[in-house]
Every structure is written in structure tokens, then in C-alpha cells.
Image: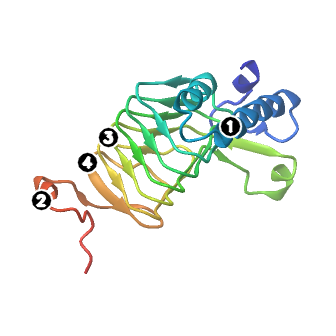
Amino acid sequence: MEALQKIVPGELYDANYDPKILEIRKEAKTKIHEFNQLSPAEDEKREAIIRELFGSVGKNPVIEAPFYCDYGANIHLGDDVAINHNMVILDGAEVRIGNCVFIAPNVGLHTAGHPIDVERRSKGLEFASPITIEDYVWIGASVTVIPGVTIGKGSVIAAGSVVIRDIPEGVVAAGNPCRVIRKITAEDQKTTNFIKRK
């Protein structure tokens, strides 16, 4: 994956016209297409594709189809990660997902972005910054995480949130932009509703 070494976190690179990067992306998307066409009963084949494609994969991965990514090699999963349907990972930079992380449907982890000015953007230039999801995080449905964000150990991100800055460990966070609502406490062992609605 020498071509991916051209992608230096936070610096611009040619995402749309560099032939080596395009070839790696095509190979990855071909494997993902194969993964998405397999029967849910073909667990071993599905896991084999993920292990071949990703940078590293821990024990007991669960990834429901459809799943999408750009390169795969920059994705690192810990043990017992569960990813629900329609996950999108734009992995121009590394995406590290810790142990026992639950990710609901329609979540996007987007390490990639484009320049604000039209001149550089129109040349196909892009940047990427890593995303880290620490152990025991739960990410609700339809959450978007932008480049450079870390979500701390044990935290919960409520459905529909847009995470634009780091989230500390052990909290419930929600909204657009996503903000900490409260700490997770022992009281949470007594309820199923993690956000108290007014």
C-alpha cells in the first residue's frame, strides 16, 4: 500500500487523479462489492474478505451488509466490534475502532475533507485526518463523525449527531454539533432511556 503513504494526515493529496490511489480504491471497492453480495449465511467468506481488506481485525467482528469504505487498509478493528447496516468509512487516514464498540445503522466515519476554496477543490485535492473510537463506545443511528475526532472510552453518541470535536470518555453526547449532555453514572444501570426527554 505504498500509494497510501502519499496521504499524510492534514496535508492535501490528489484523491481523484493519482492513478495508484485510484487503483487501490478500485481494488477495495471490488472486494466490498463482493462482501455486500454474499448471503448472510456465508459468515466465513464475509469475515475472510474483511480480514484481507482491513489493516487489522480483532476477534468476533460483526459487519452487516451493505458496508462501504475507500481503501480498507487504514481501518483497524478491536475485539467484539458490531457494525450495523449501511456503514460508510472514508479511510484516507487511519480509523481505529476499539474493543466492544457498537455502531448502529447509517453511520459515517469520514476522515476525508476538501479545501474550502474552489480553486484547489476543483483540482481534486483532499485532506484526511484520523478518527479514533475508543473501547466500549456506542454510536447511535445516522451519526456522522468528521476528520480528526476522537470519541472517548465508554461514551454514547445519540442518534443523528454530527461529531465535529473530540468527545471525552464516559459521557452521553448528542446534537448538531454534538455536545456533551451529561456523564454516565450508576443510575444508568436502572433505566433503558439514556437521554431524559423533557
Looking at the image, residue 59 sits to the left or right of residue 26; the answer is left
| Location of residue 197 with respect to 146 vertically, above or below | below
Looking at the image, residue 18 sits to the left or right of residue 165; the answer is right
- Residue depicted at x 69% and y 42%: 127
Q: Secondary structure at mark 1?
A: helix
Amino acid at circle 4? Gly
Most distant residue in the bottom direction = 198
Q: Nearer the viewer, residue 68 or 181?
A: 68
Q: State the separation of the CA atoms marked 1 and 4.
A: 33 Å
Which of the two labelled residues, at mark 1 and mark 4, occupies the earlier sequence position?
A: 1
Amino acid at circle 2? Lys
Is label 2 in contact with label 3 (beta carbons under 8 Å)? no
Q: State the separation of the CA atoms marked 4 and 2.
A: 17 Å
Is label 1 in contact with label 4 (beta carbons under 8 Å)? no
Task: Report x, y in % for residue 70.
Answer: 69, 39
Question: Which label lies toward us, 2 or 3?
Answer: 2
- Residue depicted at x 32% and y 47%: 168
Residue matched to label 2: 190
Q: State the separation of the CA atoms marked 2 and 3.
A: 19 Å
Q: Secondary structure at mark 4?
A: loop
Question: Which label lies toward us, 1 or 4?
Answer: 1
Q: Which mark is residue 32?
A: 1
Which of the two labelled residues, at mark 4 and mark 3, occupies the earlier sequence position?
A: 3
